[in-house]
Amino acid sequence: MTSREKHDRMANAIRFLSMDAVEKANSGHPGLPMGCADIATVLFTRFLKYDPKNPHWPDRDRFVLSAGHGSMLLYSLLYLTGYEDITIDEIKNFRQLGSKTAGHPEYGHAAGIETTTGPLGQGFANSVGMALAERILNAQFGDALVDHYTYALAGDGCLMEGISQEALALAGHLKLNKLIVFWDHNNISIDGAVSLADSTDQGARFAASGWNTLACDGHDPEAIANCIELAKKSDRPTMIACKTTIGFGAPTKAGTKAVHGSALGKDEIAATRKALGWEFAPFEIPSDILDAWRLAGLNSAKKRKDWESRLAGTGADTRAEFERRMRGDLPVGFDEAIAAYKKKLAVDKPKVATRKSSEMALEVVNGVVPETVGGSADLTGSNNTKTSQTNAISAGNYGNRYVHYGIREHGMAAAMNGMTLHGGVIPYGGTFMCFSDYARPSMRLASLMGIRTIFVMTHDSIGLGEDGPTHQPVEHLAALRAIPNHLVMRPADATEAAECWQVALESTKTPSTLALTRQNLPALRTEFNEENPCRLGAYELATADGEAAVTIFASGSEVEIAVAARTLLQQHGHPTRVVSVPCFELFEEQSEEYKAALIGKAKVKVAIEAGIRLGWDRFIGLDGIFIGMHGFGASGTIEQLYPHFGITAGATVDAVEKRLHKK
């Protein structure tokens, strides 16, 4: 056991690296690293299973800094324990352009950063997904290969955010007992005392949702260690309320809002050095303390070697399957299964809603990709996200493949991100597209991190009918398309739905949203094509009889309208081509030559989509004709609504011919 004096010096190494880095940058949050240094020192030297030299090994414990503003805590730990990505120069370069030590931890910048945090509560909810993924994989591969903990450090702000309630309720319900959350209970937020805005009994709140709750002095290493030991014996997730002093050690600013989000200033740092007996220059760590930290990293690495021995002793087939899943590779036979299914669709020509054709595609996908884990925010029957292979996961029954997330869209999306980040599973989850608003912060972070999380958004337009404008997406397609590195795919029929699922599963560095209809759509792709034209983002579905005078661009349910308008226009002597546009983002990835040729030079360009115009000028120009929504929807039947809003083949023909006659 580490002596108290040695523990204090090791914890102070975190404190002074953090305050010196923030001071040099003149930007950052020193209070949390100073206040949580004791918790982190106990965890990383006595409990956490990790290997700085092999940071991605699958059975490591996960540590999530949900309170991402305290990023220097994590960067200090990674440097001190010997992660190669975080050098002392990176610490000195904190918050500078191009550094790995960004203002908030960013996944992919450096090994040891398990997720991007900063928007409060997201990391906490990610940790729930990580803990769930661990249990799912443990049920499939056993304790020998998968048996680790997920630790999260959350602040008062994380627990005030609404997403925390969604996440903790799900974790408690599923009894994710390998999840341990430290609450940095320091009673301070940016505005001042937490009591200005909140008087919640957090322990009672967690306990009410099925958590084991403990409390300790967050500056007493033995009390912290005792709580972790107790947490590891629980059959429920554990929240440890660690009473801390923000900015611990700063003589005049500790325990105040002044130390939360600003550099301490040279005078306060000098006084803190004196108060804590730290006689070393900025960024200087005494050799005995650095050695002690590096030794902690080396000692933990022994567990990785034991795990590798167990992996080597596993049967060849099991080992190969485990390694494939953790790499994120799709199984052999996936493309062939999709091709065979598309051949069947070309024969059957089903007329179904794309939410149904998505389910049909998933029946194929889930049969050949065993790591997919479906789910829905209490809309399973509407989202069509459950297939014959995906029975419900429940507490103690983690070997299944379907999560009932409850009416928790935000928590669902963040948990799915955590599952993706953990590795070994490919999560997808559904809700109504209008409620992507409730999930959007997590969808944005999936894009920022560049991870394969798949969001299934059904009821994608006024076509949902009588539920009316509260449920009818109008601006949502444009809003989601505005997120960088996010594939928004809106298939027009069953074949496109299968192809969009293929793209989503292949896209390991980009999340996808599938926008799907409630209403039935005819089969438009009636010939088998072994290629996947949806990968192009937009492609010519129907050619013009002669040189095109009109090009109609459309997505999803409106491609049917475009095809019907083309028939009428050609009957009237206007050669017309139809371009299906399932995905704007994929189209922009194509060559300039392809894009120019596809847009073409027709006299009249039209776009049809039951959403707002934003984004479509890329295809039709500022003077193009847009057939779509110009405001909110209305309550009525689909048969009433499309004519009411002028989204019909007849309205398209009228608008085109009016324009042609002008020309």
Image (cartoon, rainbow, N blue to C red):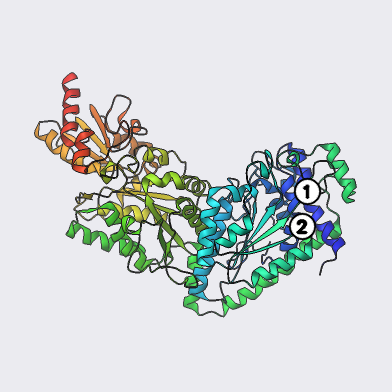
Q: How many marks?
A: 2
* Residue 298 pos. (x, y %): 73, 66
- Which numbered disc, 2 or 1, marks the residue that appears first in the sequence? 1
* Residue 592 pos. (x, y %): 38, 36
Please tell me the numbered disc located at residue 436.
none
Please tell me the numbered disc located at residue 38.
2
In the image, taking residue 67 as reference, residue 370 lies left or right, namely left
Secondary structure, mark 2, is helix
Say which quadrant the N terminus sits in: bottom right
In the image, taking residue 125 as reference, residue 63 lies left or right, namely right
The picture quadrant where one finds residue 589 is top left
- Can residue 591 be seen in this snapshot? no
**Distance of label 2 from label 1 (alpha carbons):** 14 Å
In the image, taking residue 450 as reference, residue 548 lies left or right, namely left
Which amino acid type corresponds to the residue marked 2 in the rendered image?
A: Asp
The crowd level at tag 1 (other Cα within 10 Å; few <14, some 14-19, many 20+) is many
* Residue 219 pos. (x, y %): 78, 57
The crowd level at tag 2 (other Cα within 10 Å; few <14, some 14-19, many 20+) is many
Secondary structure, mark 1, is helix
- Can residue 583 be seen in this snapshot? yes
* In front of the other: 545 or 168: 168
* Residue 190 pos. (x, y %): 67, 40
Q: Nearer the viewer, mark 2 or mark 1?
A: 2
Please tell me the numbered disc located at residue 17.
1
Q: Which residue does the image show at 56% across and 61% down from the upper left?
A: 208
Residue projecting furthest to the top: 662
* In front of the other: 342 or 127: 127
Which amino acid type corresponds to the residue marked 1 in the rendered image?
A: Leu
Q: Which residue does the image show at 17% across and 36% down from the upper left?
A: 649
Say which quadrant the C terminus sits in: top left
In the image, taking residue 456 as reference, residue 50 lies left or right, namely right
